[in-house]
Image: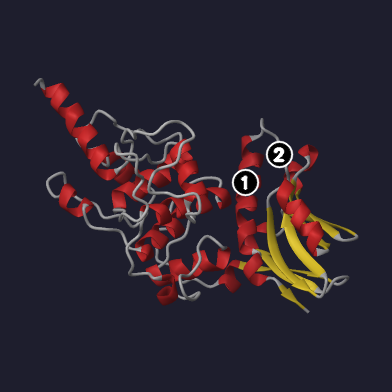
């Protein structure tokens, strides 16, 4: 066998063993035989396969409970965003190297291994706690494992298995393939891009991240906005709705989100049409966030659109600070 063919075969074998980009023997629109219709992660798995983050196995299975290792998780995460400055190397001897190197350049806490011991390290299963730390780093944070979990729980990127604590999160439990693609999808919904992690370890404190208070005197609720929003948004109150607008994008609409107050059926009907985040209820008053359904910034102005996206990414931090007076 020629040297080039050997390299290609080795790369294909690595992909097949990991379950990433392996050719699966199922038809388009069919279901993996080990992912039944009532499986909790079925929709997310189908999304991940459709978007080519990961694939099934040649026997028609997905193996949702199978453990994920660091390099596989990094591949899923980076493939979800397809950053312009990422260069894959499908013909290389080690398919994972570009993903590990890219994460390292962003300052994420990845295990760097040499070519000699990379395979041994790659076989070590990733814990849910380490996955949380990578997700927090991809959000532009630099926290310990426990603080990363607290951050993800607060901003709605994760849920605890038993309680909203690092222990209840199951930080030492092995991360499964179904859990991995679920985490990646939640990050993709809430973060517009992968971010570099700061060099110094931070201490997580939501009250220090969100310091700009907003209080609605008419309906008696309040929450705190991210500190970096100060001076960049306009707030327009209109009866049961409050519009939060990116000042620099106002000519293009600039709407970041709307807070609505309505009956339960109002929320349910709206939730079927557009993306929403439920905040809470008091009596028959239900308060929820509505995201815009169309583009609200200039596509030609890259600086302004980048700021709009940065502000939009901060919306997820509002819910933990929401309270009734």
Callout 1 secondary element: helix
Hey, which residue is sitting farthest left in the picture?
1
Per the model, the C-alpha gap separating discs 2 and 1 is 9 Å
Mark 1: few, some, or many residues within 10 Å (few <14, many ≥20)?
A: some
- Locate the C terminus by quadrant: bottom right
Q: Position of residue 260 (x, y in %)?
A: 80, 59
Asked if one can make out residue 10 in the rendered structure from this viewpoint, the answer is yes
The residue closer to the viewer here, 196 or 272, is 272
The residue closer to the viewer here, 229 or 190, is 190
Q: For residue 89, which quarter of the picture? A: top left
The residue closer to the viewer here, 56 or 37, is 37
Residue marked by disc 2: 297
Hey, which residue is sitting farthest bottom in the picture?
325
Disc number for residue 309: 1
Residue name at image x 27 percent, y 44 percent = 18
Residue name at image x 69 percent, y 62 percent = 278
Q: Position of residue 197 (x, y in %)?
A: 43, 55
Q: Position of residue 240 (x, y in %)?
A: 87, 61
Residue name at image x 31 percent, y 36 percent = 22
Q: Are marks 2 and 1 in contact (CB under 8 Å)?
A: yes
Placement of 269 over or under 53, stated as above or below: below
Placement of 114 over or under 207, stated as above or below: above
Callout 2 secondary element: loop
Residue name at image x 61 percent, y 42 percent = 306
* Colour basis: secondary structure
Q: Is residue 287 left or right of residue 63?
A: right
């Amino acid at each position: 066998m020629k040297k080039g063919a050997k390299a290609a075969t080795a790369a294909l074998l690595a992909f097949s063993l990991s379950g990433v980009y392996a050719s699966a023997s199922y038809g388009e629109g069919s279901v993996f035989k080990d992912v039944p219709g009532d499986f909790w992660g079925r929709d997310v798995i189908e999304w991940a396969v459709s978007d080519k983050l990961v694939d099934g196995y040649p026997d028609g299975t997905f193996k949702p409970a199978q453990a994920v290792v660091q390099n596989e998780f990094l591949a899923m995460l980076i493939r979800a965003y397809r950053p312009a400055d990422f260069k894959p190397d499908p013909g290389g001897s080690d398919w994972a190297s570009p993903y590990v190197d890219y994460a390292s350049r962003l300052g994420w806490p990845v295990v760097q291994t040499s070519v000699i011991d990379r395979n041994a390290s790659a076989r070590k299963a990733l814990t849910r706690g380490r996955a949380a730390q990578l997700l927090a780093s991809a959000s532009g944070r630099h926290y310990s494992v426990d603080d990363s979990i607290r951050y993800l729980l607060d901003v709605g990127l994760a849920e605890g298995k038993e309680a909203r604590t690092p222990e209840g999160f199951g930080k030492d439990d092995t991360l499964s393939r179904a859990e991995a693609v679920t985490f990646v999808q939640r990050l993709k919904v809430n973060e517009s891009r992968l971010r570099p992690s700061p060099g110094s370890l931070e201490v997580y404190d939501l009250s220090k991240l969100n310091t700009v208070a907003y209080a609605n005197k008419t309906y008696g609720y309040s929450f705190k906005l991210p500190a970096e929003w100060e001076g960049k948004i306009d707030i327009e109150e209109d009866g049961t709705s409050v519009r939060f607008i990116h000042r620099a994008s106002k000519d293009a609409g600039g709407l970041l989100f709307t807070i609505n107050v309505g009956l339960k059926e109002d929320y349910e009907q709206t939730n079927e049409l557009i993306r929403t985040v439920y905040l809470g209820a008091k009596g028959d008053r239900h308060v929820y966030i509505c995201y815009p359904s169309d583009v609200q910034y200039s596509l030609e102005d890259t600086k302004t659109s980048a700021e709009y996206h940065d502000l939009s990414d901060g919306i997820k931090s509002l819910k933990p600070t929401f309270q009734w007076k």
